[in-house]
Image (cartoon, helix red, strand yellow):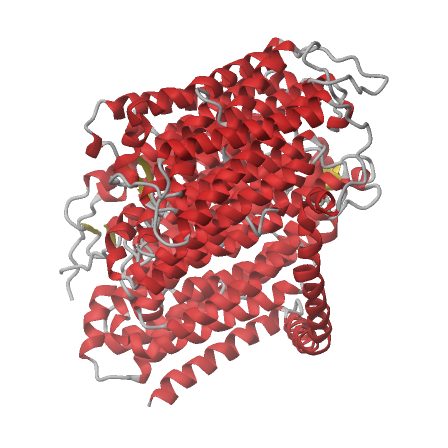
């Protein structure tokens, strides 16, 4: 099945095409086609995994060239898929979580008249995301990269009749373009340096390139990763992206697409291993984002935006791990997988809550929902325990490893990265507990017209399955470092390193901070009364509530000067360039008009043109040649 | 002088005989089948079946071809893989065009009675009687047969015969439009007169070449030319005139004047066929003439190729910018494409033999598809029925909303013309320009790329108009969108082909790479 892995891309793609082309005719059954396509893709991935596990570790990667785009030219572009432990991990995560979310959406989107189109876009996303992770070259990866960007745009703006949702979609799209420039630049440098863009060749030739070149490629790749994964300084779009339907937030903006940046860094390990400076920058970006995200998460009252901030922060952890080099790659991916489960589960839980509360998102008007929606409460609770990193739940196994790895190294780095990761864990505990208690505990602060109720089985079953994953997947994969060994052929074998602090001390410190954070949140938001309207808040709160004024900063630093530059340029353009172009265009048009006059409809003048042309040609060639 | 009766290799000629034979049978059907409805069905069936059969035979010949190919009829015909590749392209175009011909939307594209005066009582009576000019099927078969001959003839005199065999039916068919008949008649007459003029130039060129080399066989000319002292003015003039005669058929500047008028006036299904097939056949012949007969004159003729290519690209592009009529815009785009085709001839590199069939396949499919779309967008007649085609650009505004599939297909064809990646047109341009770069003509390629960029403007303008401009008030009442099953089939098939060739070109490119050897007659 490994060689047939292309089916995993083709099936959802075909389904998306069918759903879009069939139009309204498919309204009645279209969503089930979508579910089936995603499920079938999972089946393909699962069978490929079984086949892969039957082989010895070093033979597990299978690179299949599907076809050569343009044979026999200098621009030799092979379209090929690489099924190795890393990509198959992603395939399973995407298709498994994706299928659950498809099922959930059947109920969640039931009353939307465009449900079929929604499923078409979801399928399109799955196909593009699978292409992204299965591509065996940067070029093909880029196709998937743009594909998920498109799907993300379409889904954020799915309810584009609301102007601010359409704006959110545009914002995500534009910010992602900045990142894409990075990927294009990286590909350009790679092509000039290595003459190829496939992972295998680049990996082989990486030794020939200078460290400076590798650092340049690495930083360009990091820019791309920052755009897609909402890392500092390109994180501003993720909060607004919550405008999309909640299943979209769960699948694309929590579990899968936003982790593509981490994938890109880990997949480019050979490059980053040769560029230590770029690695440090990756780790710094991760550390900044994980703190920033946590601080924003503490101040948000919108349940989805708080979860989005948390996603940003958790991906910061993954980036940090990826920036640590070979020691961190496997843990980055490990955390990515467990995060995919518990965060998707929590988003679905949030969707279930919104379903019950007439699509309200303000946590200050929630409270005491545990009685009304037991399944949502329990499943969300498991996700909450997982993200806090309470043993034995999933997050503990992956996050704790990252914190330990961050403490490994020499000089200032282990202290800065390690302590950031450690404190981040405490902050995470605080804001996630705040979210959990404000929503499910305390007193009911509901608006008058709402009557909370549990969601239908089509929604709760996926939530239950994800909750089981949030609870036990980490333990299952951590036993005997199973997962790290599985990834070893890709991430490389790592000797054991001792952190600068003893491991038990780190673990104990983490758990104490987490407990403190949770208890503090309980005191403030569980036991105490929560105000129904957000208090004015300190400067710090306001800063965090406004995403650290990132939008204002963007506006001040990029948009306004950009506008000034643009305006100046527009003026210059209008006066000078357009002047020239217009004159030239008028020139072209008048040439066009003049030539048109030659085409005067008189057959004799047509014949004359031909004759004159012939005579000139003969004269030049024959007489001129003599 | 003693004549030896040539032995004719009938087996090698089978596909051409099938097509021309079916055309002759079609003429008899005209005489003996009375009911117009039955006649149309029988003619269409015969045409499609014969073309498909010929295509089958061509494929079989490809599979069983021994060595480089067969020389038939005393060296006057050469059936090699290059010829077979062109023949199969032409047959595919032929089949698609027949389906368009048969489309009955708005009463069909062809007039009821070709000999009637427009607007006369005669015409009205013919309409009431349900008459239809079903001669177009055998005529088109004759044209396809002639074009197939054109791709494998290796003798200048025979080449002239083939040229007339496929041109004459086209002149007639251009005049047979059902609507805007005066325009159609005028176009036909102009096409005929200019065609005759170019034929004269061609045959004069043949005579001069014969005078200089004493032969008309392409291979022998090739060998004779090498022995002649360089730059013999008679030979050069002759060669130029022969090439100009072919350039007329391709529609290159300054021999392009017929293109906009004929494209506009002809019944749209015929424009589709003519635009795709004539260009392909003429290119095939030009390949043989240039590569076999005049290769030693490459340096002298390169001047002609460069000048005409640049003139075509620039003039075609610039004038297309100011067109307001879609058929004329596509006609000028065809002129620009003639320039792009000629670019591949620069340097006469072997790559061109792979690039050109692919380019013409991609271009032809796009042309057939685009004109098929044009035939679906109609004005409403005053009596509420379906009128003539809505060809003014403004009438296409908002088409994307009303008929997304139709407008989407059109957008695809236009993007392919513009050479946007993931369409067949991109691969075609890439291959053609690569061939020119291999021939050292990178300046020409630079101009070609710039011209493509400018050309993208008017293609994209139509896309913007279809998708991003709202339809004017009352467009529903004035513009009708036809939904003929046959035409729609052709549109979707060509659109799918454009996409497949754009994404998975390797298979077809490999086939054409096998075809990139021209068999030169050893005798």
- Give the residue drawn at x 52%, y 27%: A387
Relative depth, front residue between A225 and A616: A225
Residue A24: x percent and y percent? 66, 23
Relative depth, front residue between B116 and A1: A1
Can residue B22 be seen?
Answer: no
- Give the residue drawn at x 35%, y 37%: A502
Can residue B488 be seen?
Answer: yes
- Is residue A607 positioned above or below A94 on the image? below
- Is residue B45 positioned above or below A373 on the image? below
- Is residue A533 positioned above or below A295 on the image? above
Relative depth, front residue between B367 and A190: A190
Relative depth, front residue between B415 and B311: B415
Q: Quadrant of residue A25?
A: top right
Residue B24: x percent and y percent? 41, 39
Q: How many marks?
A: 0
- Give the residue drawn at x 68%, y 47%: B466
Question: Which quadrant, please, contains the C terminus of chain B?
Answer: bottom left
Residue A124: x percent and y percent? 52, 33
Residue B368: x percent and y percent? 52, 45
Q: Is residue A143 left or right of residue B72?
A: right
Q: Is residue A430 left or right of residue B426?
A: right
Which residue lies most toward the right here?
Answer: A448
Question: Which quadrant, please, contains the N terminus of chain B?
Answer: bottom left
């Amino acid at each position: 099945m490994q060689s047939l892995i292309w089916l995993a891309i083709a099936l959802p793609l075909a389904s998306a095409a069918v759903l879009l082309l069939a139009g309204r005719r498919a309204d009645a059954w279209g969503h089930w086609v979508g579910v089936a396509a995603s499920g079938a893709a999972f089946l393909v991935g699962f069978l490929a995994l079984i086949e892969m596990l039957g082989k010895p570790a070093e033979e597990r990667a299978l690179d299949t060239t599907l076809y050569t785009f343009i044979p026999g030219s200098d621009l030799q572009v092979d379209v090929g898929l690489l099924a190795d432990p890393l990509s198959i991990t992603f395939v399973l995560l995407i298709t498994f979580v994706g299928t659950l979310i498809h099922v959930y959406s059947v109920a969640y989107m039931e009353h939307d008249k465009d449900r079929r189109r929604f499923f078409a876009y979801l399928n399109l996303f799955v196909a593009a995301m699978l292409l992204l992770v299965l591509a065996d070259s940067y070029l093909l990866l880029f196709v998937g990269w743009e594909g998920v960007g498109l799907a993300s745009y379409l889904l954020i703006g799915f309810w584009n009749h609301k102007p601010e949702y359409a704006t959110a979609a545009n914002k995500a799209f534009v910010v992602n373009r900045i990142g894409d420039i990075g990927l294009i630049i990286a590909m350009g440098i790679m092509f000039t340096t290595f003459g190829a863009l496939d992972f295998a060749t680049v990996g082989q030739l990486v030794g020939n390139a200078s460290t400076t070149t590798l650092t340049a490629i690495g930083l360009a790749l990091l820019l791309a990763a920052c755009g897609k994964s909402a890392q500092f300084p390109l994180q501003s779009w993720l909060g607004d992206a919550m405008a999309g339907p909640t299943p979209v937030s769960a699948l694309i903006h929590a579990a899968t697409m936003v982790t593509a940046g981490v994938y890109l860094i880990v997949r480019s390990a050979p490059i980053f291993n040769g560029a230590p400076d770029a690695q440090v920058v990756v780790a710094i970006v991760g550390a900044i984002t994980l703190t920033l995200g946590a601080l924003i998460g503490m101040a948000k009252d919108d349940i989805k935006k708080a979860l989005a901030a948390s996603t940003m922060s958790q991906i910061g952890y993954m980036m940090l791990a990826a920036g640590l080099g070979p020691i961190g790659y496997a843990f980055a991916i490990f955390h990515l997988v467990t995060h995919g489960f518990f965060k998707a589960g929590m988003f679905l839980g949030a969707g279930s809550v919104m379903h019950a509360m007439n699509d309200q998102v303000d946590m200050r008007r929630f409270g005491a929902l545990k009685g009304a929606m037991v399944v949502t409460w329990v499943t969300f609770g498991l996700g909450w325990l997982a993200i806090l990193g309470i043993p034995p739940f999933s997050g503990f196994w992956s996050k704790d490893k990252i914190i330990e790895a961050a403490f490994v190294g020499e000089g200032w780095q282990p202290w800065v990265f390690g302590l950031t990761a450690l404190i981040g864990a405490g902050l995470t505990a605080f804001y996630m507990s705040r979210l959990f208690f404000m929503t499910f505990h305390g007193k009911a602060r509901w608006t008058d017209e709402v009557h909370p109720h549990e969601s239908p089985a089509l929604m709760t079953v996926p939530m239950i399955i994800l909750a089981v994953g949030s609870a036990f997947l980490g333990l299952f994969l951590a036993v005997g470092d199973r997962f790290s060994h599985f990834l070893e052929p890709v991430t490389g074998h790592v000797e054991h390193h001792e952190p600068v602090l003893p491991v038990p001390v780190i673990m104990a410190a983490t758990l104490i901070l987490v407990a403190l954070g949770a208890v503090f949140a309980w005191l403030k938001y569980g036991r105490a009364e929560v105000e129904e309207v957000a208090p004015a808040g300190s400067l710090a709160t306001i800063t965090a509530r406004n995403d650290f004024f990132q939008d204002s900063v963007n506006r001040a630093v990029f948009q306004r000067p950009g506008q000034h530059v643009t305006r100046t340029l527009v003026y210059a353009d209008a006066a000078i360039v357009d002047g020239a172009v217009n004159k030239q265009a008028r020139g072209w048009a008048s040439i066009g008009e003049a030539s048109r006059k030659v085409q005067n409809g008189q057959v004799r003048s047509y014949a004359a043109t031909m004759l004159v042309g012939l005579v000139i040609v003969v004269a030049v060639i024959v007489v001129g040649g003599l | 002088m003693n004549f030896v009766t040539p032995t004719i290799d009938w087996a090698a000629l089978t596909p051409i005989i099938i097509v021309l034979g079916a055309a002759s049978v079609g003429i008899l059907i005209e005489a003996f089948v009375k009911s117009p409805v039955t006649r149309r069905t029988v003619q269409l069936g015969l045409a499609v079946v014969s073309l498909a059969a010929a295509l089958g035979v061509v494929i079989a010949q490809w599979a069983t071809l021994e060595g480089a190919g067969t020389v038939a009829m005393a060296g006057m015909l050469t059936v090699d893989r290059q010829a077979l590749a062109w023949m199969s392209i032409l047959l595919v175009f032929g089949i698609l065009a027949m389906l368009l011909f048969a489309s009955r939307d708005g009463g069909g594209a062809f007039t009821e009675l070709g000999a009637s005066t427009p607007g006369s009582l005669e015409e009205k009576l013919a309409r009431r009687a349900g008459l239809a000019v079903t001669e177009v099927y055998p005529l088109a078969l004759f044209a396809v047969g002639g074009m197939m001959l054109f791709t494998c003839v290796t003798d200048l005199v025979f080449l002239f015969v083939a040229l007339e065999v496929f041109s004459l039916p086209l002149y007639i068919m251009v005049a047979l439009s059902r609507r805007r008949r005066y325009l159609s008649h005028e176009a036909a007459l102009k096409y005929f007169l200019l065609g005759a003029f170019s034929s004269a130039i061609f045959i004069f060129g043949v005579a001069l070449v014969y005078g200089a080399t004493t032969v008309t066989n392409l291979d022998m000319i090739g060998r004779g030319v090498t022995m002649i002292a360089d730059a013999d003015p008679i030979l050069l003039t002759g060669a130029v005139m022969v090439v100009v005669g072919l350039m007329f058929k391709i529609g290159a500047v300054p021999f392009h004047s017929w293109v906009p008028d004929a494209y506009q006036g002809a019944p749209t299904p015929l424009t589709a066929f003519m635009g795709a097939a004539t260009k392909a056949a003429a290119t095939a012949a030009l390949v043989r003439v240039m590569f076999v007969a005049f290769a030693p004159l490459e340096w002298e003729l390169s001047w002609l190729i460069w000048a005409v290519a640049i003139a075509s690209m620039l003039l075609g592009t610039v004038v297309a910018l100011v067109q307001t009529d879609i058929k004329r815009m596509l006609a000028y785009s065809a002129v620009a494409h003639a320039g792009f085709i000629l670019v591949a001839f620069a340097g006469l590199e072997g790559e061109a033999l792979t690039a050109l069939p692919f380019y013409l396949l991609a271009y032809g499919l796009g042309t057939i598809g685009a004109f098929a779309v044009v035939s679906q967008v109609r004005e409403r007649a005053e009596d509420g029925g379906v009128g003539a085609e809505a060809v003014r650009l403004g009438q296409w505004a908002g088409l994307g909303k009303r008929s997304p599939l139709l407008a989407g297909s059109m957008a695809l064809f236009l993007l392919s013309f513009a050479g946007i990646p993931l369409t067949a047109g991109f691969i075609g341009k890439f291959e053609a320009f690569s061939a020119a770069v291999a021939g050292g003509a990178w300046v020409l390629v630079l101009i070609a790329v710039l011209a493509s960029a400018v050309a993208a403007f008017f293609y994209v303008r139509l896309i913007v108009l279809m998708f991003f401009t709202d339809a004017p008030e009352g467009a529903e009442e004035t513009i009708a969108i036809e939904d003929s099953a046959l035409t729609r089939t052709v549109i979707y098939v060509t659109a799918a082909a454009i996409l497949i060739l754009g994404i998975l070109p390797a298979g077809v490119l490999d086939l054409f790479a096998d075809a990139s050897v021209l068999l030169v007659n050893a005798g």
